Image (spheres, rainbow, N blue to C red):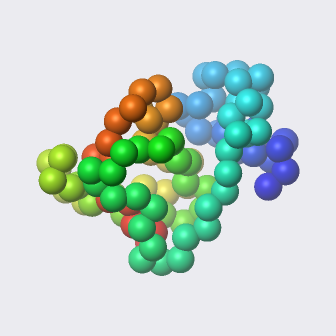
Amino acid sequence: MALDEDIAFFEQVPALAALGKQALRILAIGAETRTLQSGAVLFYAGELADGGYVVQEGSLILEPGSVAEGSEVTVGPGTLIGELALLTNTVCQATAIAK
């Protein structure tokens, strides 16, 4: 995606929209795109988190690991996951699998 398209996409993510265009521009410059095949794991529960992720297309299944309780959740486009890792060192609370 071009920089302007990335910024426009981030503006549609509720948790990011409030940051404003300049902050979103900085995020977009540092962002990278990952394409996952169905069944591929983005991250595992218990791993050190390396950043936040926004689902652009498709969906991810979040399966709670031994460090978290709850049931499996499916998230789709526009969902921000792992946002706490943008602020502090933390571990992933679930395993994220491409659906």
Q: Position of residue 90 (x, y in %)?
A: 35, 36
Judge left or right: residue 89 versus residue 6.
left
Residue at (42%, 77%) from the top-left corner?
Answer: 39
* Quadrant of the drawing holding the C terminus: bottom left
Residue at (84%, 50%) from the top-left corner?
Answer: 2
In the displayed structure, would residue 95 be above or below residue 16?
A: below
Of 13 and 29, the residue lying toward us: 29
Q: Is residue 80 visible?
A: no
* Quadrant of the drawing holding the N terminus: bottom right
In the displayed structure, would residue 86 be above or below residue 48?
A: above
Task: Give the quarter of the image for residue 19.
Answer: top right
Q: Position of residue 86 (x, y in %)?
A: 50, 32
Of 49 and 56, the residue lying toward us: 49
Q: Position of residue 88 (x, y in %)?
A: 42, 27
Of 21 and 89, the residue lying toward us: 89
Judge left or right: residue 8 versus residue 95.
right
Q: Position of residue 91 (x, y in %)?
A: 32, 42
